[in-house]
Structure formats: structure tokens, C-alpha cells
Amino acid sequence: DAGVTQSPTHLIKTRGQHVTLRCSPISGHKSVSWYQQVLGQGPQFIFQYYEKEERGRGNFPDRFSARQFPNYSSELNVNALLLGDSALYLCASSPRTGEGQYFGPGTRLTVT
Amino acid sequence: RKEVEQDPGPFNVPEGATVAFNCTYSNSASQSFFWYRQDCRKEPKLLMSVYSSGNEDGRFTAQLNRASQYISLLIRDSKLSDSATYLCVVNVNSGYALNFGKGTSLLVTP
């Protein structure tokens, strides 16, 4: 079975620009979560969606937004990029909330 | 205080050694517990869930002490391929988010 897929794998943007990251969950998984990981730290929770509804939001500014589509794929949008947004953005899926989550390979975003 | 705390290491051990990692969490309402493994510049991979009764998966044993809010991972007969960062993970708020520790780095040497 295919795992979680994310696109693009790498991205370079300039401060102030906008970025859209995409994620397709494992088939049958209805929950998608987004995490940000900076070097030397564990992943930090950004959003969780379940059945197309936002179920949780981490401590991130309103510049970060997300949505989940009817096929359970998801997009993470970040507006007005800052240098500090440079990180690995990870998408994870699970069959239900409360269970272990399975991560995609991530999108490595560099903001210059 | 961080929600999940781990000793960052690094732990350098020879092949065949037994190594243990510890983790503490601050939220007594935490409901689910996991260990993840992360290789350099790769995504975290679920290693095992952690149950109150303790559980074992091959060379790996996980323990949970809810009273002390403490989680452990024991790796027996270490292999070179076990070299990675091990992340302690706690799930609160009815499963909305995973809270990760910073990770413990393990290097297994020949």
C-alpha cells in the first residue's frame, strides 16, 4: 500500500511570498495532521483535520491555514513567509484520532 | 516546562549492547504514548505504541508508568542499523495532536 505522499519535496521561497504544500494520506485514513520540524527539535503540531473538519490547531500564527478535501487529501498554506518559517513540513495520517500517526517524507521549505 | 522531556544524548554504544532511553511528560491527562524513530533528514517512523502493562516487539521493550509520568524504551542486542534519533511522543486532547520530545540520538558502533 502507498504511504503518505507530499509535494513538493523541496521548495525555495522569498520572504513575503505565499506557499501551498500538499498531502495525500494513506488510503482509508480520514485524519490528516501537519507538523513543522526545525533542525534539532521534534515536530511541532500545526493542524489536525478529521472528516474535512479542523479538530485541532497548534500555537501558530494566522498566516498558517489548512484544509482537507472530500478525498481526504490536504493542503497547508502559509502567507507572508518569514525566514523563521524555514523548516521541514510533515504531514501525517491515521485511521482515527488518538492512534499512532504515519508520516510522509515531508516538504523542505527554505525562505530566503 | 516542556510537555515531553528527553535526554538528547548522544548515546554511543557498541554493537550487541543494551541501551535504555527515558522520557517524562507533564500532562497527567495524556492518553496515548508512542516511540518514533527518525533517521537523519527523514520523516519520523512509528516504532511502537506504549501500553500501561508494558509491551515488547522483538528487541524493543517499552514501559509506561502513569503515576510517575515516565516512559522508557529498552533496546537489546543493538545493531548498527539502530543508529537514529528516538522520539518520545505523547497524545493529549482526545488525540488532536502528538507532542514530541526533542529526541535522543543513538549511535551504535562496530
Image (cartoon, rainbow, N blue to C red):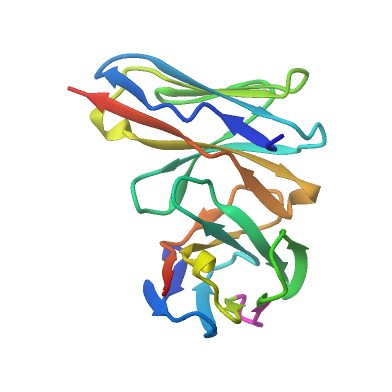
Q: Which of the image's four quarters has the N terminus of chain A?
A: bottom left
Residue sitting at x 69%, y 57%: A96
Give how far across and how far down residue A37 sits, in percent: 51, 55
Residue sitting at x 17%, y 22%: B110
The residue at the far bottom in this view is A17
Q: Nearer the viewer, residue A41 or B46?
A: A41
Q: Nearer the viewer, residue A62 or A6?
A: A62
**Image check: A109 left or right of A34?**
left
Give how far across and how far down residue B72 sits, in percent: 56, 22
Q: Which residues are magenta?
A: A67-72
Q: Is residue A85 visible?
A: yes
**Number of numbered discs visible in the structure rendering:** 0
Which image quadrant is residue A59 in?
A: bottom right
Give how far across and how far down residue B57 sits, in percent: 47, 28
Q: Nearer the viewer, residue B49 or B104?
A: B104
Q: Judge whether A75 appears above or below A1 on screen.
A: below
Residue sitting at x 79%, y 49%: B94
Q: Main secondary structure of the magenta part?
A: loop
Residue sitting at x 36%, y 29%: B106
Give how far across and how far down residue B58 sits, in percent: 41, 25
Which image quadrant is residue B29 in?
A: top right
**Image check: B71 left or right of A61?**
left
Q: Which of the image's four quarters has the C terminus of chain A?
A: bottom left
Q: Judge whether B12 appears above or below B46 on screen.
A: above
Q: Is residue A8 visible?
A: no
The residue at the far left in this view is B110
Q: Nearer the viewer, residue A4 or B101?
A: B101
Residue A28 lies within the magenta run: no
Q: Judge whether A10 appears above or below A92 on screen.
A: below
Q: Judge whether B69 appears above or below A9 on screen.
A: above
Which image quadrant is residue B32 in?
A: top right
